């Protein structure tokens, strides 16, 4: 489960981060759908969610559905490394919320550059 989620997150990164695709690109939609299918079948808990702390924000960049966005946020907040303020995991959540707010308001697809803007706004980096 964890390995396949990492693989789908790598596809999303390759398509969006390296190829310049947006969240509406068919390849991104397919990788996102495959990840979500596995993720929804997996019982929430410390294992395997703690091993998905890094792939989940990548998935979040490509997540367009508000219900899926809320699910990702809930699963991440259930982990101490994401729930505590000042942690990297918590900053990931705040960056995702920032990106989702921008794209949900404008109705445009998410791009990898949105992550850059969110990280500058939230983390100052």
Image (cartoon, rainbow, N blue to C red):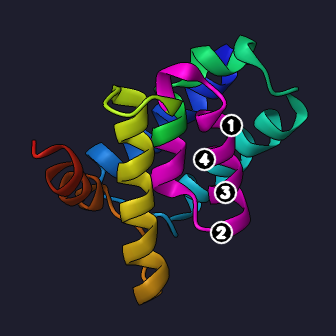
Mark 4 = which residue? 73
Which of the two marks, 2 or 4, is nearer to us in this view?
Answer: 4
Instruction: Where is residue 4? Give x, y as percent.
Output: 68, 22
**Residue at the outermost left position:** 125
For marks 2 and 4, the one nearer the N-term is: 2
Which of the two marks, 2 or 1, is nearer to us in this view?
Answer: 1
Q: Do the residues labelled 2 and 3 touch (CB within 8 Å)?
A: yes
Q: How far apart are marks 2 and 3 (CA)?
A: 6 Å
For marks 3 and 1, the one nearer the N-term is: 3
Q: How far apart are marks 3 and 1 (CA)?
A: 9 Å
Secondary structure character of the magenta stretch overall: helix
Mark 3 = which residue? 70
As helix, strand or loop, the secondary structure at mark 3 comes to helix
Q: In this view, does 75 lie above or below 3?
A: below
Asked whether 38 falls inside the magenta stretch, the response is no
Mark 2 = which residue? 66
Q: How far apart are marks 2 and 1 (CA)?
A: 14 Å
Q: Please state if 60 lies on the left or on the right of 69 as rendered.
A: left
Q: How crowded is mark 2: few (under 14 residues within 10 Å), some or many (20 or more)?
A: few
Q: Which mark is residue 5?
A: none
First to last magenta residue range: 58-82
């Amino acid at each position: 489960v964890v390995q396949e989620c990492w693989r789908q997150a790598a596809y999303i990164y390759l398509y969006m981060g390296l190829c310049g695709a947006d969240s509406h690109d068919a390849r991104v939609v397919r990788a996102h759908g495959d990840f979500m299918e596995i993720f929804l079948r997996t019982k929430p808990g410390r294992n395997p969610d703690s091993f998905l702390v890094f792939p989940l924000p990548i998935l979040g960049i490509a997540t367009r559905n508000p219900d899926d966005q809320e699910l990702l946020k809930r699963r991440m907040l259930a982990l101490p490394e994401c729930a505590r303020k000042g942690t990297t995991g918590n900053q990931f959540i705040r960056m995702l919320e920032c990106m989702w707010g921008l794209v949900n308001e404008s109705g445009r697809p998410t791009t990898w550059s949105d992550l850059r803007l969110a990280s500058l706004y939230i983390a100052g980096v």
